Amino acid sequence: MNPERRLVASLLACLLFGYAAVSCLVFYRRMRRQILNYKDAPLERMVHSPQYGLTLWLTGLIGVVGFIIASWQLVLSVLAILHGT
Protein backbone atom coordinates (compact mmCIF):
# COMPACT_ATOMS: atom_id res chain seq x y z
CA MET A 1 0.00 0.00 0.00
CA ASN A 2 1.46 3.38 -0.95
CA PRO A 3 2.00 6.09 1.70
CA GLU A 4 -0.87 8.27 0.45
CA ARG A 5 -3.38 5.46 0.89
CA ARG A 6 -1.93 4.62 4.30
CA LEU A 7 -2.25 8.29 5.25
CA VAL A 8 -5.94 8.37 4.35
CA ALA A 9 -6.63 5.03 6.08
CA SER A 10 -4.74 6.14 9.19
CA LEU A 11 -6.60 9.45 9.30
CA LEU A 12 -9.94 7.66 9.05
CA ALA A 13 -8.87 5.17 11.73
CA CYS A 14 -7.79 8.02 14.03
CA LEU A 15 -11.19 9.65 13.65
CA LEU A 16 -13.15 6.46 14.29
CA PHE A 17 -11.03 5.19 17.18
CA GLY A 18 -10.92 8.67 18.69
CA TYR A 19 -14.70 8.90 18.54
CA ALA A 20 -15.02 5.51 20.24
CA ALA A 21 -12.61 6.51 22.99
CA VAL A 22 -14.27 9.86 23.64
CA SER A 23 -17.81 8.54 23.60
CA CYS A 24 -16.99 5.66 25.94
CA LEU A 25 -14.50 7.14 28.39
CA VAL A 26 -15.21 10.87 28.59
CA PHE A 27 -19.00 10.59 28.60
CA TYR A 28 -19.09 7.51 30.86
CA ARG A 29 -20.30 9.45 33.92
CA ARG A 30 -22.97 11.28 31.93
CA MET A 31 -24.19 7.99 30.47
CA ARG A 32 -24.41 6.44 33.94
CA ARG A 33 -26.66 9.31 35.08
CA GLN A 34 -28.90 8.86 32.06
CA ILE A 35 -29.07 5.11 32.63
CA LEU A 36 -30.66 5.69 36.04
CA ASN A 37 -33.62 7.29 34.22
CA TYR A 38 -33.82 4.50 31.63
CA LYS A 39 -37.01 2.69 32.58
CA ASP A 40 -39.69 0.77 30.70
CA ALA A 41 -37.65 0.69 27.51
CA PRO A 42 -36.87 -2.32 25.30
CA LEU A 43 -33.19 -2.52 26.31
CA GLU A 44 -33.62 -1.82 30.02
CA ARG A 45 -32.21 -5.20 31.15
CA MET A 46 -29.06 -4.73 29.10
CA VAL A 47 -28.49 -1.15 30.26
CA HIS A 48 -28.93 -2.05 33.94
CA SER A 49 -26.71 -5.12 33.58
CA PRO A 50 -23.48 -5.13 35.64
CA GLN A 51 -21.53 -5.88 32.45
CA TYR A 52 -22.71 -2.65 30.80
CA GLY A 53 -20.10 -0.46 32.54
CA LEU A 54 -17.35 -3.00 31.90
CA THR A 55 -18.32 -3.11 28.24
CA LEU A 56 -18.12 0.68 27.99
CA TRP A 57 -14.67 0.74 29.59
CA LEU A 58 -13.42 -2.12 27.41
CA THR A 59 -14.71 -0.43 24.26
CA GLY A 60 -13.10 2.83 25.35
CA LEU A 61 -9.80 1.07 26.00
CA ILE A 62 -9.91 -0.52 22.55
CA GLY A 63 -10.61 2.96 21.16
CA VAL A 64 -7.59 4.44 22.96
CA VAL A 65 -5.24 1.65 21.85
CA GLY A 66 -6.56 1.84 18.29
CA PHE A 67 -6.14 5.62 18.29
CA ILE A 68 -2.52 5.31 19.44
CA ILE A 69 -1.70 2.74 16.75
CA ALA A 70 -3.51 4.72 14.04
CA SER A 71 -1.75 7.92 15.12
CA TRP A 72 1.62 6.21 14.87
CA GLN A 73 0.75 4.93 11.39
CA LEU A 74 -0.33 8.45 10.45
CA VAL A 75 3.05 9.84 11.56
CA LEU A 76 4.89 7.12 9.64
CA SER A 77 2.85 7.84 6.50
CA VAL A 78 3.54 11.58 6.71
CA LEU A 79 7.26 10.90 7.20
CA ALA A 80 7.28 8.52 4.21
CA ILE A 81 5.53 11.11 2.03
CA LEU A 82 7.88 13.90 3.15
CA HIS A 83 10.95 11.73 2.71
CA GLY A 84 9.84 10.73 -0.78
CA THR A 85 9.54 14.31 -2.04
Image (spheres, rainbow, N blue to C red):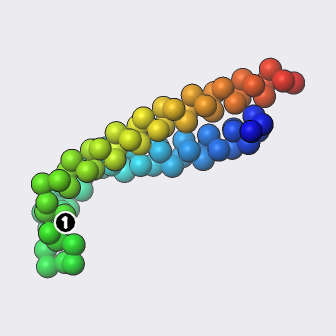
- Residue at 62% x, 40% y is 10
Q: Is residue 10 above or below residue 23?
A: above
Q: Nearer the viewer, residue 32 or 72?
A: 72
Question: Is residue 4 placed above or below 77 in the rendered structure?
Answer: below
Q: Looking at the picture, does residue 58 appear above or below residue 32?
A: above
Closer to the camera in the image, 2 or 32: 2
Q: Position of residue 67 (x, y in %)?
A: 48, 37
Does residue 17 show up?
A: yes
Q: Is residue 29 visible?
A: no
Specify whether 2 is left or right of 44: right
* Image x and y of residue 73, in percent: 61, 31
Q: Position of residue 39 (x, y in %)?
A: 13, 74
Question: Hey, which quadrant is residue 47 in on the image?
Answer: bottom left
- The amino acid pointed to by label 1 is Met
Residue 78 relative to residue 54: left or right: right
In the rendered image, which quarter contains the N terminus? Answer: top right
Tell how many labels: 1
Q: Secondary structure at mark 1?
A: helix
Residue found 51% across the figure and 49% down from its top: 16
Q: Is residue 4 left or right of residue 72?
A: right
The residue that mark 1 highlights is 46
Q: Residue placed at 63% from the left, 27% from the top?
A: 75
Query: Residue most toward the top?
Result: 83
| Quadrant the C terminus occupies | top right
Neighbours of disc 1 within 10 Å: few (<14), some (14-19), many (20+): few
